[in-house]
């Protein structure tokens, strides 16, 4: 897809950008590449593709059981509260 220097300057004006001459040529090339890529995407046949917000709607999370382990001695020494070789922390989740 062609993109003229005039179009680049117009986009720069809309974006309130002041471009140097070498930047105009650089942005012209970069914007042309972006537009060509968009054109390729638009040519894809997506009729069979179901719309998706995250792409993971059908994935079921594999949950694992929490395992309780005694705290390491060096960590327990730094904790504000200890009880029976475990670090005591505030409750953050309700059942």
Image (cartoon, rainbow, N blue to C red):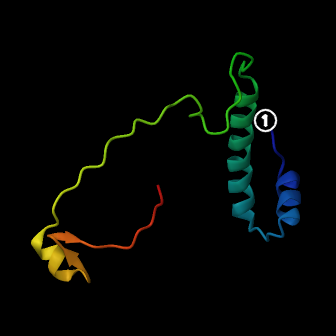
Where residue 32 sits, quadrant-wise, is: top right
Residue beneath label 1, please? 1
Name the side, left or right, on which 78 lies relative to 66: left
Residue shown at the point (75%, 59%) measured from the top left: 24
x and y percentages locating residue 58 in the rendered image: 56, 28
Q: Residue at x 89, y 58 (%)?
A: 10
- Nearest the viewer among 90 and 14 is 90
Q: Residue furthest top?
A: 48
| Residue 15 in picture, x, y percent from top left | 83, 65
Residue 42 versus residue 8: which sits nearer the camera?
42
42, above or below 84, in the image: above
Relative to 37, say whether 23 is above or below.
below
Q: In the picture provided, is 73 more to the left or to the right than 13?
A: left
Specify the quadrant of the image occupied by residue 35: top right
Give residue 65's quadrant in the image.
top left
49 to the left or right of 15: left
Q: Secondary structure at mark 1?
A: loop
Residue sitting at 61 percent across and 39 percent down?
54
Question: Which quarter of the image is occupied by the N terminus?
Answer: top right
Residue 19 lies, in percent from the top left, at: 76, 67
Are there few (<14), some (14-19), or many (20+) residues within 10 Å of tag 1?
few
């Amino acid at each position: 897809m062609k993109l003229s220097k005039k179009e680049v300057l117009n986009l720069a004006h809309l974006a309130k950008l002041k471009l140097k001459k070498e930047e105009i040529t650089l942005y012209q090339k970069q914007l042309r590449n972006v537009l060509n890529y968009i054109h390729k995407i638009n040519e894809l046949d997506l009729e069979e593709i179901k719309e998706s917000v995250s792409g993971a709607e059908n994935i079921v999370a594999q949950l694992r059981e929490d395992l309780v382990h005694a705290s390491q001695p060096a960590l327990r020494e730094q904790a504000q509260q200890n009880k029976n070789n475990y670090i005591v922390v505030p409750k953050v989740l309700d059942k």
